[in-house]
Image: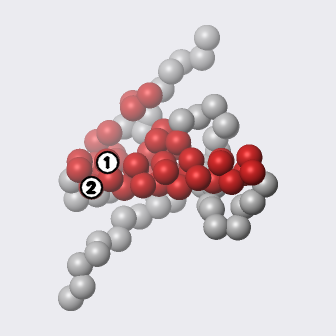
Amino acid sequence: MPNAQGIIDPPIDELLAKVESKYALVIFASKRARQINDYYAALHEGSLLDNVGPLVDSTVEDKPLSVALHEIGENKLTLRSNTAN
């Protein structure tokens, strides 16, 4: 049986260093997970025009939230602030 990595890979401390707060991390990762979910739904329907798939190596069995956290951990995604100065 392969080792389950869960939230230990990538380490939560490394993920938190990339965002302003743990709340920002949750929102950032959940929005990306939704995009990945939409990608797989569109893939199933045969239309891939508006969706970006996983940016890291993954399989269909990987949960979208885990994939999103790996993307953040590998610096494939960066969080932009919405503040206008």
Q: Which image quarter holds the N terminus?
A: top right
The kind of residue on which mark 1 rests is Val
Image point (40%, 50%), residue name: 29
Can see residue 83? Answer: yes
Give the left or right position of residue 4, taking residue 16 as reference. Answer: right
| Residue 72 % position (x, y) | 44, 53
The kind of residue on which mark 2 rests is Ala
| Residue 32 % position (x, y) | 47, 54
Label 1 near label 2: C-beta < 8 Å?
A: yes
Q: Secondary structure at mark 1?
A: helix
Closer to us: 23 or 71: 23
> Which class describes the residues within 10 Å of circle 1: few (<14), some (14-19), or many (20+)?
some
Q: Secondary structure at mark 2?
A: helix
The picture quadrant where one finds residue 81 is bottom left
Residue wearing tag 2 = 24
Can see residue 70? Answer: no
Residue wearing tag 1 = 26
Closer to us: 30 or 11: 30
Q: Which image quarter holds the C terminus?
A: bottom left
The picture quadrant where one finds residue 69 is top left
Structure colour scheme: secondary structure
* Residue reaching furthest to the top: 1
| Residue 40 % position (x, y) | 65, 47
> Which class describes the residues within 10 Å of circle 2: few (<14), some (14-19), or many (20+)?
some
Give the left or right position of residue 15, taking residue 75 as reference. Answer: left
| Residue 70 % position (x, y) | 49, 45
Image point (63%, 53%), residue name: 39
